[in-house]
Image (spheres, rainbow, N blue to C red):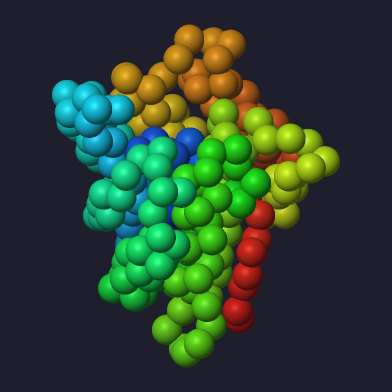
Amino acid sequence: MTDNLAHLGKVLVIAPHPDDEVLGCGGTIARLADSGQEVHVAIVTKGYEPDFPASMVNQVRQELFAAHRILGVTQCHFLDLPAAALDTLPGSRINAAVAGLVRDIAPDTLFVPFVGDVHRDHQLVFTSALVASRPRGPEVPQRILAYETLSETNWAAPGITEAFVPNVYFDISTTIDRKLEAFAAFKSQVKPFPDERSLETLRALATVRGSTVYRAFAEAFVLIRVVA
């Protein structure tokens, strides 16, 4: 496989919660890192007491650092908005936080959660990312792609909410093992099969997405916008 992701340039992956970036883009992140490209990850939310014990939040953050070392993430950014409570905030606050991040990093390519995900945090992050990327000047992402997240993307109501119908596939045959290793680093999040958040299911999804385009393993995305 020849590397053909150089056209993505500087990349920013926006994740509502820790591990979303690994589930949706882990193999692609590793490919980009292997080719020497700059890959930033932004975690939008943070758990706060009493809903999320501080010990658990600290554990997940350490798991995230371990996962990112495995993948080769250039830098991780934390917005620290309240997890599972974005819908309690003014939209302007979420928009401003995400817009500031996009402005400071100035990515060529933006990866965002899918608007049809069942989790409200995912939906709001998608919308804020698009608000931040409005083409009102030359310094906006040239490409925006939405990724799928196991246990979020396919659990919404079919036929009523937006369906994830991918039209972009990135071959991760050389990095599937790193993706699985990175997710395994999230010991607090990995579940035993047949739970969707299991290593077996993550590998199975990559197999299905790969077979769709005659590859051993792939990650699938919905292209939101491209300017060439």
* Picture layout, residue 36 above or below residue 143: above
Q: Position of residue 213 (x, y in %)?
A: 74, 44
Q: Is residue 66 left or right of residue 223?
A: left
Q: Which residue lies at the image location 47% right of the left edge and 54% below the top edge? A: 125
Q: Which residue lies at the image location 30% right of the left edge and 27% below the top edge? A: 51
* Picture layout, residue 95 above or below residue 158: below
Viewer-side residue, 112 vs 208: 112
Viewer-side residue, 28 vs 151: 151
* Picture layout, residue 6 above or below residue 1: below
Q: Position of residue 172 (x, y in %)?
A: 54, 41
Q: Position of residue 192 (x, y in %)?
A: 48, 10
Quarter of the picture holding the C terminus: bottom right
Viewer-side residue, 16 vs 167: 16
Q: Which residue lies at the image location 65% right of the left edge and 46% below the top edge? A: 116
- Using the rendered image of the protein, determine whether residue 32 is visible from the camera's viewpoint: no
* Picture layout, residue 138 above or below residue 200: below
Q: Which residue lies at the image location 60% right of the left edge and 42% below the top edge? A: 117
- Using the rendered image of the protein, determine whether residue 38 is visible from the camera's viewpoint: yes
Q: Position of residue 130 (x, y in %)?
A: 53, 67
